[in-house]
Amino acid sequence: MDPLFALFVVIVGIGGLFFLDRENSAGTSKALWLPVIWLWINGSRPISSWLDMSPKQYSQGELAATNLLDQSVAGGLMLFGIIVIVRRRRDVIVLLRASWPIVLYFSFCLVSLFWSDFPGWGFKRWLRAAGELVMIMIVITEAQPTAAVRRFLSRVGFVLLPTSVLLIKYYPKLGQGYDSQAGNQYNCGVTDNKNTLGAVAFLVALGTLWQILRLLLDRGQPNRTRRLLAQCTLLCFGIGILFMAHSATSGVCFALGAGLMLATTLPLIRRRPAAVHALVLCVFLGGGLVELLGGRSEAMKAIGRQPTLTGRTPIWNVLSTMAPNPIVGAGFETFWIGPRVAYLDSLFRGINEAHNGYLEVYLNLGWLGVGLIALIVGQGYRRAVDAFRHGRDPTFGPMLVAYIVTAVTYSITEAGFRMLSAPWLFLLMSVVAAGWVTGSATARCSRAENSPPQPSRWATAIPN
């Protein structure tokens, strides 16, 4: 197929997916486009990179943080976002109180800049990290939060996934990259590397599976057939891209998340929180037993990985001894700056992250930071399980559990708790959403959920 014709087909196809998935009964405002655009950018490449029209390898978020165009776009989105949440401040305050571990973590990240060697750089990064929290608040403070989550996932997936396939198949100069160390090409789609592409694909695919289950279980939903067609098409794109990306971690996380979601949707398990805990515990105990019994090599080969996790274990051995302060770390997002980077580059060429979320947090924020991450995950998981009883949607709680458990799993071999990464944004969104369902936010927000749709409720917060 001619590349230009393929581009035309994809554009028409994306429009068709939006048309099929339209949900007139869902009351969401125009402000929801702010987090959608935010993830379109952070889930692919910075705008400056697109204008250069070539895939590049760079430290995550570094190019976006130093380019004036990218700074302006991010600043504009954050400014409009702040205007929106100021207008919704009552609901935002309730949500933040319900999600106090997240507030505590962000506060500690800001305080950590006092002992950082690069506080100016770290403060810029902290502002961008706070921008992600602003976008999450926009989604969850919509008049109908579950409908907002559905539309957020669909709008992100309808654009990023088909476009990735287009670039990989018909525009390889944009959709593929070259690994000079391994000596082979890889598929990156709209992103800058295969791991990011795999993460976006598995996260969107999990959300799509949730929507499909919801439509299958509730036969009374309007326009159910055409919406099922759109979501099934998107799920096929997600699974296909997981194979194209050859990202073993993302593939395992999708399989794990999908299995948990399907199992916990069953009434027998959903009505018994202890059964959910037992199921999750079995998953992690199974992984632990494989490691203890010396089965790592066979397990890694089975998923297409080397026994050293594609060279990660030597990196971990070196990095684990390099934290400037084991209690409080180097300061928020400032470990990978300065002489340390030059030294590590001489050992592991091109390294810009720890390829382990817990080690990444330890290097930047020490054991205190790791403890706060554990607090966020623990509270989010507990409330996600409670959502099985409190939520009217029998599939929403399982989806939140799947996102939180896969975030924990993904961060074993990737820096999943790092700002501007899709897994981190989805983890935060799941924790905040779980607080909305079960925490002190329920009383206030449930009234909006039960009220008639108000699509223009916050429309005046941003221009048309």
Image: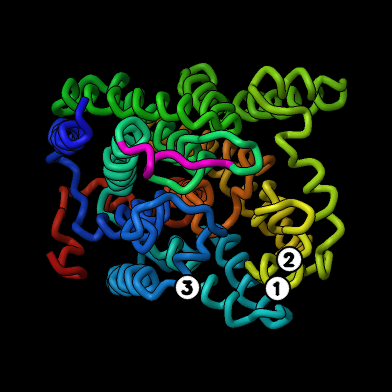
Element at badge 3? Answer: helix
Residue 48 percent coordinates (x, y): 36, 63
Query: Do the numbered discs 2 and 3 sit on residues whose CB atoms are within 8 Å?
Result: no
Check if residue 176 falls in the magenta segment: yes
Query: Do the numbered discs 2 and 1 sit on residues whose CB atoms are within 8 Å?
Result: yes
Q: Earlier in the sequence, mark 1 or mark 3?
A: 3
Residue hosting label 2 = 342
Element at badge 2? Answer: helix
Residue hosting label 1 = 338
Q: Which dot, 2 or 1, sits closer to the camera? A: 2
Give neighbour class at mark 2: few <14, some 14-19, many 20+ (Cα, 10 Å): some
Q: Which dot, 2 or 3, sits closer to the camera? A: 2
Query: Do the numbered discs 1 and 3 sit on residues whose CB atoms are within 8 Å?
Result: no
Which quadrant of the figure has residue 161? top left
Residue 296 percent coordinates (x, y): 79, 24
Where, quadrant-wise, is the N terminus in this rendering? top left
On screen, residue 17 above or below 67: above
**Can residue 387 be seen?**
no
Q: Which residues are magenta?
A: 171-179
Judge left or right: residue 241 versus residue 228.
right
Which circle marks residue 66 in the picture? 3
Where, quadrant-wise, is the C terminus in this rendering? bottom left
Q: Amino acid at mark 3?
A: Thr
**What residue do we see at 74% from left, 39% from top?**
311
Give neighbour class at mark 3: few <14, some 14-19, many 20+ (Cα, 10 Å): few
Q: Closer to the camera, 128 or 286?
A: 128
**Can residue 42 be seen?**
yes
Q: Amino acid at mark 1?
A: Gly
Residue 257 percent coordinates (x, y): 53, 29
On screen, residue 10 above or below 118: above
**What residue do we see at 52% from left, 76% from top?**
124
Element at badge 1? Answer: loop
